[in-house]
Image (spheres, rainbow, N blue to C red):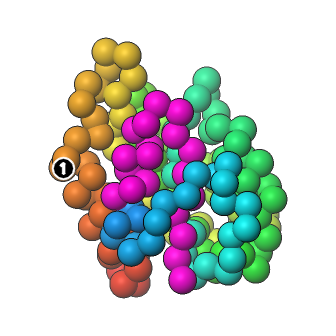
Amino acid sequence: MNAVVYVSKGGNTKKLADAVAKGAEVKAQSAASAVNLTQTDILFIGGSIYCGRMSGVLRKFLQNLDQKQAAKAVVFGTSASGKTIRAEVTSILESKGIPVVAESFHCKGSFLCVNSGRPNADDLAQAEEFAKRVCKGGV
């Protein structure tokens, strides 16, 4: 079984999470409501950078995650600046013995007037295909 957990403040990462979930054939869950996560083969984790760091809600979710809940993790997200949450997620999860797949998926996200319209339909299609490839063992 796989799971998609995300935090989205402006809606960009939620759009991406829904596309990843479609590719993984599961339903995306907000990190705030994913407290009873059962054992997963692949845990897709989505978020963005807020004031230079990932969301505190996502950090708390990851810190409370038990090694038995995820065999491995995959990171995805959006960003107006190009920065990602990958390093923070990897640091937290690998210290718990949960490996993070080297390949991740990130695309531009709109913020104010920057990257208007992103993620777009092409970004969402790529995210869905990325998740399908990960689930089939191609990553």
Image height of 36 relative to 137, above or below: above
Q: Is residue 126 at all visible to an observer of this figure? A: yes
Q: Which residue does the image show at 58% across and 52% down from the upper left?
A: 30
Label 1: how many Cα within 10 Å (few below 14, some 14–19, many 20+): few
**In this figure, what is the number of numbered marks?**
1
Amino acid type of the residue that numbered disc 1 sits on in the rendered structure: Asp
Query: Is 96 contained in the magenta span?
Result: no
Residue position for label 1: 122
Quarter of the picture containing the C terminus is bottom left
> What residue is shown at x 36% (from left), y 34% (from top)?
109
> Which of 112 and 84 lies nearest the eye of the viewer?
112
The quarter of the picture where residue 25 lies is bottom left
Q: Residue 102: in sight, yes or no? A: no
Membership of 3 in magenta stretch: yes
**Relative to 73, does residue 120 appear above or below in the rendering?**
above
Where does the image place residue 5, in percent across and percent down from the top left? 56, 58
The answer to whether 65 appears left or right of 2 in the picture is: right
In the image, is residue 108 above or below residue 92? above
Where residue 26 sits: x, y (%)? 45, 72
Which residue is outermost to the top? 113
Q: Quadrant of the N terminus?
A: bottom right
Locate residue 133: give its quadrant.
bottom left
Classify residue 88 as left or right of residue 104.
right
Residue 96 image-quadrant placement = bottom right
Counting from the top left corner in percent of width and height, residue 116 is at 26, 25
Horizontal side of residue 23 vs 33, given as left or right? left
| Residue 57 percent coordinates (x, y) | 70, 42
Disc 1 element: helix
Q: Which residues are magenta?
A: 1-19
Q: Residue at x 66, y 60 (%)?
A: 34
Residue visible at 68% across and 70% down?
37
